[in-house]
Image (cartoon, helix red, strand yellow):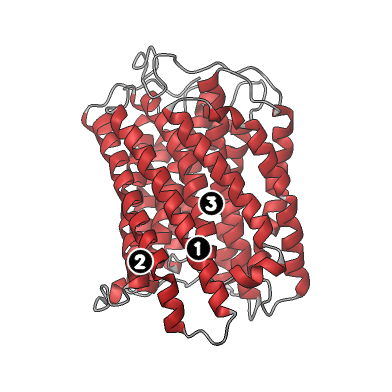
Amino acid sequence: MTTAPIQAGPTSGEWDAPAGAGAAGAPGRGPLLFLIGSALVWLVVSGVFALIASIQLHTPGFLSDCPILTHGRVRVLQETAFVYGWLGTAGPALAVWILGRLSGSPLRGTSWLGVGAAFWNAGLALGLVGIAIGDGTGTALFGLPAYVHPVMLASYAAIAIAGVLAWTGRRRGPMFAAQWYAAAALFLFPWLFSAADIMLVLAPVRGVLQAVVAGWFAQGLWTLWMAPLALAGAYYVVPRLTGKTLPNYDAASLGFWCLVFVGGWTGGRHLIGGPVPAWISTLAVVTTAMLVFHYVVVALNLRPALGAGSVLRFIAFGVGSYVLGGFVDAVTAARSVAVSTQFTTFDQAQQQLALYGGVSMLLYGTLYFAIPRIAGRAWSSADLLRGHFALAATGIALLVVSLGAAGLSQGRDLADPSVSFAAMATHMQVWLLVATGAQAILLLGNLLLAVNFLETAVLKPGSGEGVAS
């Protein structure tokens, strides 16, 4: 990757439609808006499930008479709707859009994009119904029933066709970090998902190998799919809003390859102390520490996001959470620390910091930059945008802190045989109540984003700018 200068976005307002929007047709505008709109629906749905699951932690009788809304199923429903519905729908849509913008030509394969979007959402809806009636696989981040796996793989491939065509048919010139991360995410997800499907469902491995494969898949889904989707947006948006080449950009390729080659080996850190060969967890501890290099590069490259601007505030918060989450992972991977944090809500705090604080906030920022350029119209309400940031930042901070504090209390009590489970629950209750309040705040913020999108791109759409840079 070369350090070619990148032009800034419009100076009239970073969420405004650019000058000349609507001058040309927008290939793929309809499918892209459908993908993003459906992603926001899943985001709100996951927020409702998250609120229910959080209430059940401190009030076990809540909805206890409804068999499809037991805590175990609600947690999987929330996780699946958030990862595959929100991140896994908005992320690929924005990645395809970015690859199209940087290709220098109109987006191709848009009919495949529309077909893939329809079947992806249909498969996900069917999968959530299957989870609710007890057909889920029971594997973290892989809870979708086996009968929807082929639909999800085929529909994702159809969505990715437009991005692959844009990437392979680009004009000759420098390759940017945004293209690397976007293309990697589009290529690596089918490999991860199909490998897990074979080893956990179609021809399941036996014994403790199932835990090893499940840990590899969960970590790979984070490092090789969700993180690249979010970073593609950040690397695309930040230079355009600042008007400057990213600092230390020569190291961006090293950070990318570090994530690709090292990230997939870190899954064993969740198996420390488990009945698996010691080398698996040891390798994971070492590679988690090595991955710190990637987080340092990302922090150096994207530090201009700390500048003023509503969109950049989302990016800055996301980068900060992403980097902080990486350092926390490195610390908690140490055996002396893991003995107190494993199997507690501290793990949930780390997951929320990474997925919500890191990936989701980065996608929010990319979304606020992209929608005016896809729909050809400025955001309907700047106040809703600012309100969304305030609620999202507050909710994420409260959620991570409360779950982290509850986890530390839980870990301390688990190490003391004199503490009963009833006493442990009492010690955690205040923090869990705060976490419930945080989930309510996040749900309200997501509703603001959904309303703003509805008013901007659906009720009063523009004619679109097109996807060529």
Q: Nearer the viewer, mark 1 or mark 3?
A: 1
Q: Which mark is residue 334?
A: none
The vertical placement of 446 against 71, above or below, is above
Which residue does the image show at 73% across and 54% down from the upper left? 289
Which residue does the image show at 69% across and 37% down from the upper left? 297
- Answer whether residue 140 is visible to the viewer in this image: no
Query: Which of the two discs, 1 and 3, labels the residue nearer the N terminus?
Result: 3
The vertical placement of 427 against 296, above or below, is below
* Other residues around mark 3 within 10 Å, as few (<14) / some (14–19) / many (≥20): many
Residue type pointed to by label 1: Ala
Considering the numbered disc 1 on the image, is that residue within a helix, a strand or a loop? helix
Image x and y of residue 421, in percent: 46, 83
- Answer whether residue 119 is visible to the viewer in this image: yes
Which residue does the image show at 52% across and 17% down from the upper left? 8
User: How far is the residue under mark 3 from the one under mark 2?
Assistant: 19 Å
Relative to 52, 110 lies left or right? right
Q: Label 3 belongs to which residue?
A: 354
Relative to 63, 24 lies left or right? right
Q: Nearer the viewer, mark 1 or mark 2?
A: 1
Image x and y of residue 180, in percent: 63, 36
Image x and y of residue 117, in percent: 38, 45
Residue type pointed to by label 2: Ala
Q: Label 2 belongs to which residue?
A: 53
Residue type pointed to by label 3: Ala
User: Tags 1 and 3 in contact by the CB under 8 Å rule?
Assistant: no
Q: In this orientation, which residue lies closer to the viewer: 396 or 105? A: 396
The vertical placement of 450 against 403, above or below, is above
Relative to 402, 58 lies left or right? left
